[in-house]
Structure formats: C-alpha cells, structure tokens
Image (spheres, rainbow, N blue to C red):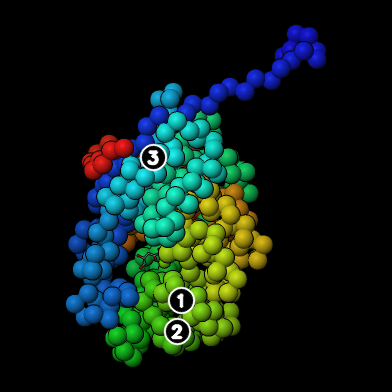
Amino acid sequence: MCARRGRCRSVVIPFPKIVAVRAFTARGGGADYHDQGAGHWIDDHIATPMARYPEYRASRQSFGINVLGTLVVELEASDGTVGFAVTTGGEPAAFIVERHLSRFLIGQNPADFERIWDQMYFSTQYYGRKGLVVNAISAVDLALWDLLGKLRQEPVYHLLGGAVRDELQFYATGARPDIARDLGFIGGKLPLHHGPAEGDEGLKKNVALLADMRARCGDDFWLMYDCWMALDVDYATRLAHACHAHGLKWIEEAISPDDYWGYAELKRNVPKGMLVTCGEHEATRWGFRMLLEMDCCDIIQPDVGWCGGITELIKISALADARGKLVVPHGSSVYSYHFVVTRHNSPFAEFLMMHPGPTEVVPMFAPQLLGEPVPHNGRIKVSALDKPGFGVELNPDVPLHRPYSN
Ligand SMILES: C[C@H](O)[C@H](O)CC(=O)C(=O)O
Ligand SMILES: [Mg+2]
C-alpha cells in the first residue's frame, strides 16, 4: 500500500535472463515414443509409406522410425531456474540447438518468446521450415514456456489464458480399443496394418479388424483408423467406404502430408458424416493455413513438439478457430494437456497408449518424465496440471548424452 496517495511508482522487477542452453539426447521411449523394445504394438506390421518395399513392411523400426531418439533442451536462467522440454530429434536436433539456436537465447529475457521464435525460424528458414529443424525450435519454445511458468510460479495453462473446462477428456490410440473402452476412454484409434501394396486381401483384413473391434466395443464408442501417411486417395476412399458400415468416426493421415490436393479430394470422397483428420507431420501457421484454406480436413492434429511449439500453436489454433475447425493435437503429453484445456475448439485430446500390450495406462512419454499426469477413467482433472511450468521433471534414471556444446 502507498503511504501517500498519488506518489506511488510501480516497479518492474527485472526478469532473470537466460544464461545457459543445453541439448541432450536420450533413448528408449520418452518423446520418441516409437523408440520401444521388441514386441510393442506400435511396431507391429503397421502400414507406412515404406510398406511398398516388402523388406520394410513387418516393422517400422526396420526402416528407421526410431533412428532419431529423444531431444531434451534445458534453458537455465540467471537465478538458477531451469526450464526444459522434450521432443523427437536426437543428435541432429541437439546440434541445431547448440550450434545455431543458442545464439538467440543466451542473454535474452525468456518472456520475449515471440522475438526468439521469429529469430529461430527465420535464421533456419534456408534449411528448415518443417521436420527436424522445427522439432528443435519447438523444443526450445516449450522449454521457454516451462521456464516462464517456473519463474512466474504458474502452470503454463494459466499463461495461455486459463482453463475453459474442469477436465480433459481423452480418446486412446493403440491396438486394443476394447480395453481402452473399459478404461474409460471416449474412443479408440487403431493403427492401420495393411497398405495398398498388400492389395484387396490387406484391405479386407483392415475392414475385418475394425468390424471385430466394433463388435467388442458396441455402437457408441468412437473408432478411428490412423493410416500414418501410407495410402493413396483411391485406396483411402475405398477403405473409408468399406469402414463406414462399421461406424468409422475418422480416417487419419491417410496420405502424404505434402499432398494437400489429395486431402481435399479425399475429404470430398468420404461418406457423409465420416471425418478426415491430418496435420501431425505439418508445421507452422503457413503449413496449417494450407490445410485449412484448401479444405483438407475436419480436424487438424498438430503435434506441439513438432509444429513450432506453443508460440506457434497459438497462431495455428486461432486460424482453425476462425474457420470453425477443431484442433486435437497429436500425442504431445503435457505440452498438449496445458494447451487443450485453454481452448474451446480443442474439446478432447489424444492419449497414446505406450504400454506394449497396450492393456494398461502408462505415462505417454514414459520413462522420460516424472510427474507426467495420466488419465483416470479417460480423464485428467485440471488440478493435476497445477504446478509451475509444464509441471514435470526429468527422470534422473534416464541417461542423457550431450553430444555438442555451444
Ligand atoms: C499409431 C500410429 O501409427 C502412430 O504411431 C502414432 C500416431 O500417428 C498417432 O498417435 O496419431
Ligand atoms: Mg496419427
């Protein structure tokens, strides 16, 4: 309180600056959730763009889906507070963070995330724009938001405007939607097993699996197919029509993420009421603007660790909202949870079932993080997010390797 009215001066307390940037790699699950051991459902003969080659059909690890591993970025502030984030990207992303992006961070105020993002994106544009480089940018951006939350002692969802609902509701991705239903999820998304190279026989097997899951799950449970970029428009259209009788709710990432024209055609082709979803391998406001303006899909699915981070997702989400489209992030664990709960056009979220079966709920980025919330009865209460930053810590039992320094 001011002792003498009219003589008060508000004082802005200087914010700690960033003094250190560190990029590490880690193996065995974590943010690179495809980096699992043998026998895991996520590596079990799943349709991919590489499945046209018989030798790369039975396992996605055979063509190197897990070659990158996890990237961990730590940002340390002058008061000793450390913000961190994880994504997919491993050693090459660690190089980009240490040798290129760190110059835009050291000595900077972490609250200046807009300028920092702009400098990271435009300085790498000549070799970046999507993929690995934007994964690296995303990890730095998420580490900045974690640091900001820790410095301000607030959860990230507060910094994003606060929760618009009391809990998050999840569908589950995995090989056992029937078990996901019993665990309280609102739906189950199956990996598609057979691609166009396996012909009509493969297509029949895809439809038969859906029919079996429909019989196990009952009529009201959402069932979706994740096609992981494996199909062409013709096959995807035939699959969608064949699956319509079994109540397929959406067909996901059916074709190459570069084929915006194909997605627009597929959206026109699918049976009325079936949704087309895509975007987990898309990045930045410019990529998502293409998907939205070309009317490629009904739901966009940015991965928060791959699309440019929270700073970019705010813009992507606003573009979608103005067009009446839903944003249901791909995976992304806590980075998704803190965002989804603040947006009306993100009414539910994905939970990737990382148990090998998958017969039980384990944290999505296990074993990388401590304190990672998991759904109970298919839901996470907002109060579970009430910790500074993203509310998680690195598990000290997971070894980190720092291949480069800045
Ligand atoms: C299950 C899918 O093939 C992929 O591994 C994960 C994914 O695309 C999703 O969760 O969506
Ligand atoms: Mg997907």
Instruction: Determine which of the numbered discs, if any, sits on residue 233 in the image.
Output: 2
Task: Pick out the residue farthest to the top.
Answer: 3
Residue depicted at x 58% and y 57%: 317
Q: Which mark is residue 153?
A: none
How many tags in the picture? 3
Say which label, 1 or 2, has the lower sequence index: 2
Residue 1, image x and y in percent? 72, 14
Q: Judging from the image, what secondary structure is the residue with disc 2 in?
A: helix
**Cα distance between the residues tagged 1 and 2:** 10 Å
Q: Give the residue at mark 1.
A: 259
- Look at discs 1 and 2 and give the one toward the viewer: 1
Question: Quick one: label 2, few (<14), some, or many (20+) residues within 10 Å?
Answer: many
Amino acid type at image mark 3: Ser
Residue position for label 3 = 102
351 relative to 164, above or below? below
Q: Earlier in the sequence, mark 3 or mark 1?
A: 3
User: Residue shown at 26%/73% (left/top)?
Assistant: 45
Farthest-out residue, right: 6
| Residue displayed at 27% across by 50% down | 91
Q: Amino acid at mark 2?
A: Val
Residue 267 appears in the figure: yes
User: How dense is the environment of label 1, judged by Cα within 10 Å: few (below 14), some, or many (20 and up)?
Assistant: some
- Report the Cα–Cα distance between label 3 and label 1: 34 Å
Place of residue 395 in the rendered image (x, y in percent of width and height, measured from the top left): 30, 39
Residues at badges 1 and 2 in contact (C-beta under 8 Å)?
Answer: yes
Q: Quadrant of residue 36?
A: bottom left
Tell whether circle 3 marks a residue whose Cβ is less than 8 angstroms from ligand 1. Answer: no
Q: Residue at x 32, y 53 (%)?
A: 89
Left or right: residue 143 compared with residue 312: left
Q: Nearer the viewer, mark 3 or mark 1?
A: 3
